[in-house]
Structure formats: structure tokens, C-alpha cells
Image: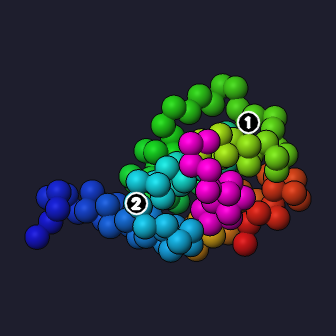
Amino acid sequence: MSATGLKAFDSTLQLTNTWLHELMEELGWSHRERAYHALRVVLHALRDRLPVDEVAALGAQVPLLVRGVYYEGWHPADKPLKGHRRDDLLAEIGAAFRDDRDVDPETVARAVFRVLERHVSPGAGVKQHFPEELRALWP
């Protein structure tokens, strides 16, 4: 039985749940909402630091449901952000978890990047647009 009645929607739900499950395993978390928040925050931080063409290339490779989250609130006119330093990226992730003191932004970033590494082709070119200190967070 189909959950939504549409194959494309059922497929993206299944794939998105796979990503969230993998992220929960990577982080040792049991709350799907927390994993969703981590995925969303890191994808937005990544997206806002990429050139527009690379944003689109990465967006084309993520599940339909994740793609909506990825593009949510994006305003390409003022992108990419200039903060390509590791500390800037980790501070943004940390700010999103400011009420959750036991969350390490670097651990979250590395976990999301590992999930992306498993599901996104290397040709997405994400890593090459960052300085070495940010590329070091990728697997």
C-alpha cells in the first residue's frame, strides 16, 4: 500500500527517512526531529557558501523532500556568503543548537557530510569550492 498514492512522493519519503536514519546512527541520536534539524542547518550553511551553480548541482542530487528543505528561504542574490572559514560554519551550526548544549557543531557537520558523501556523486564539486580548513571536515 502506498503512503501517499504517488510513487515520487513515496520514494522521496523513503529516501529522506534513510538519510535521517543514517544521520541518527552517525550521531548516536534517537530523535528524528533532532536529526532533521541537523540536516537542515548544515545544508543551509553549506548552500549559503556555495556559488549558485553549485547550489543547483547539489540540489539536483538530493531527495525531492530534502531539496525543498535545502532551498527553503534561499535568496541567491547575496550569495555566496564570504564566511568560508571553518569557525564561521561551525558557529552557524552551533547557534542553531544553542539550547542543546551537548551538541558539538563539528561532529554534526562531519556526520551530515558523511551522509552526503554516501549519497551525492563526487562530481557535485562541493568540496572544491571551500578552503582546506573546511574541506578537512569532509570524509
Residue type highlighted by circle 1: Pro
Left or right: 139 with respect to 83? Answer: left
Which residue matches tag 1? 80
Residue 75, x across and y down, in percent: 59, 28
Residue 107 in the magenta stretch? The answer is yes
Residue type highlighted by circle 2: Arg
Residue 105, x across and y down, in percent: 68, 54
Q: Mark 1: give few (<14), some (14-19) or many (20+) Cα within 10 Å.
A: some
Left or right: 43 with respect to 37? Answer: right
Which residue appears at 59% of the width and 45% of the height? 97
Q: Mark 2: give few (<14), some (14-19) or many (20+) Cα within 10 Å.
A: some
Residues at marks 2 and 1, CA–CA distance in whole angstroms: 30 Å
Point out the tag, 2 or 1, that comes first from the N-terminus.
2
What span is colored magenta in the figure? 98-113
Which residue appears at 74% of the width and 66% of the height? 138
* Front position among marks 2 and 1: 2
Q: Residue furthest top?
A: 77
Q: Is residue 16 above or below residue 139?
A: above
Q: Is residue 40 visible?
A: yes
Q: Residue furthest right?
A: 132
Q: Secondary structure at mark 2?
A: helix
Residue 71, x across and y down, in percent: 51, 40
Residue 27, x across and y down, in percent: 56, 68
The residue lying toward the viewer, choosing from 76 and 110, is 110
Which residue appears at 34% of the width and 60% of the height? 12
For the N terminus, give its image quadrant. Answer: bottom left
Which residue matches tag 2? 32
Quarter assignment of residue 110: bottom right
Quarter assignment of residue 78: top right
Q: Is residue 109 visible?
A: no
Q: Secondary structure at mark 1?
A: loop
